[in-house]
Image (spheres, rainbow, N blue to C red):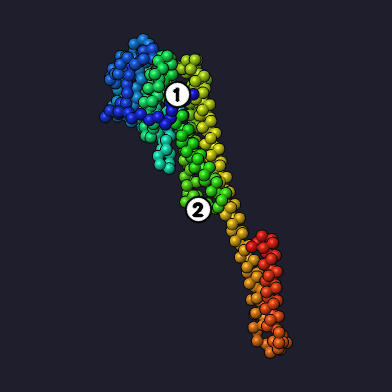
Amino acid sequence: MNLVSPTAVTPEPVSSDGVIAAGVYVEGRRIANIAIDEAASWRNKPDHVVWIGLHEPETALLKSLQRQFELHDLAIEDADHAHQRPKIEQYGDALFIVARTAQLDGESIAFGETHLFVGEGYLVSVRHGASTSYTPVRERCESCPRALARGEDYILYAILDFIVDNYSPVIETIQDEVEAMEAEVLASAMTRAQIERLYLLRRDLMRLRNAVGPLVEVCRRLERDNLPMIRPTMRPLFRDVTDHVRTIQEQIDSLREVLAFAFEASLLVGQAQETAISKKLASWLAIVAVPTAIAGIYGMNFKNMPELQWEYGYFAVIGVIVAICTMLFWRFRHSGWL
């Protein structure tokens, strides 16, 4: 289920301490933009949901959220330091989720991370590194209050679905390049630059697979385990995200296999070209060897060589050389060596 087009990017204002947006919702409608130090008071009100978005926040800001939402020390430590593996952790009645993000940066893939804190009446997202803005997610959710009224688990679903959707443009772009590369491989052997590009693509796809793979287990747990804050009615939506992640994983594996086959095909094409060149060289050497051998024999300058005194000897030798060379050329051309 595509909540938001992955290509839609909305500029986002970021405060000096890393706050992108902080709002409180009742029945799916935003009733106020709040300051971070007010989050706990709003969260404790019945049927209120606090949604906070942060981008590379300062440690002091994370500590403030920890005190207000009683977040675990280990989760705060992970959120303060990027380079975490995708995972889901349960701390009491709260969940801490790490997901890897990916987007194209020139000809390579730039990776980032999103850390999600989910508990009763709140969801906090913390972004690190390369990541598309989640402003479209918030706008889409706010445009459908009935769906957003489901609560913080729906917001969690919306963000995870958006993250997975953003893998698709990366895969599609790489797929187009791989198809073009595959067509070139069949036409001629790969150049050094093409081989280097193939290696970089395989490396990026491996890194992307390492980012996507663990997300399957995260979504599976959200779908099947009886986790706090995940209502049974939300499980079909998380199942949809799981299926989408698995599809992305299969596409990555398929592209890596195509690149491997392309490299092998390039080696075979190169070997075939080398073999063809070797056959041509061998054929011409065999043809050139005939006059060379005959001329060498008659160039030994022995006196007792009857053919040297024959009036038509020169013409006979030239004729024999031409005849043999012509026959060899015809045989090699007929066999495909020339």
* Residue 92 in view, yes or no: no
The secondary element bearing badge 2 is classed as: loop
Residue 321 lies, in percent from the top left, at 68, 75
Q: Quadrant of residue 47?
A: top left
Q: Is the C terminus in the top left, top right, bottom left or bottom right quadrant?
A: bottom right
- Disc 2 crowd rating (10 Å Cα; few below 14, some 14-19, many 20+) is few
From this view, report whether residue 169 is shown above or below residue 2: below
Q: Quadrant of residue 333?
A: bottom right
Q: Residue at x 56, y 41 (%)?
A: 257
The secondary element bearing badge 1 is classed as: loop
Say which mark, if any, is on residue 249.
none
Q: Residue at x 58, y 52 (%)?
A: 269
- The front one of 193 and 79 is 193
Residue type pointed to by label 2 = Thr
Q: Residue at x 52, y 51 (%)?
A: 190
Residue 312 lies, in percent from the top left, at 71, 84
- The front one of 218 and 236 is 236
Residue type pointed to by label 1 = Leu
Say which mark, if any, is on residue 3.
1
Q: Earlier in the sequence, mark 2 or mark 1?
A: 1
Q: Is residue 306 left or right of residue 174?
A: right
Q: Is residue 114 left or right of residue 15?
A: right
Question: Which residue position is annotated with label 2?
Answer: 191
Residue 23 lies, in percent from the top left, at 32, 19
From this view, report whether residue 12 is shown above or below residue 331: above
* Residue 19 in view, yes or no: yes
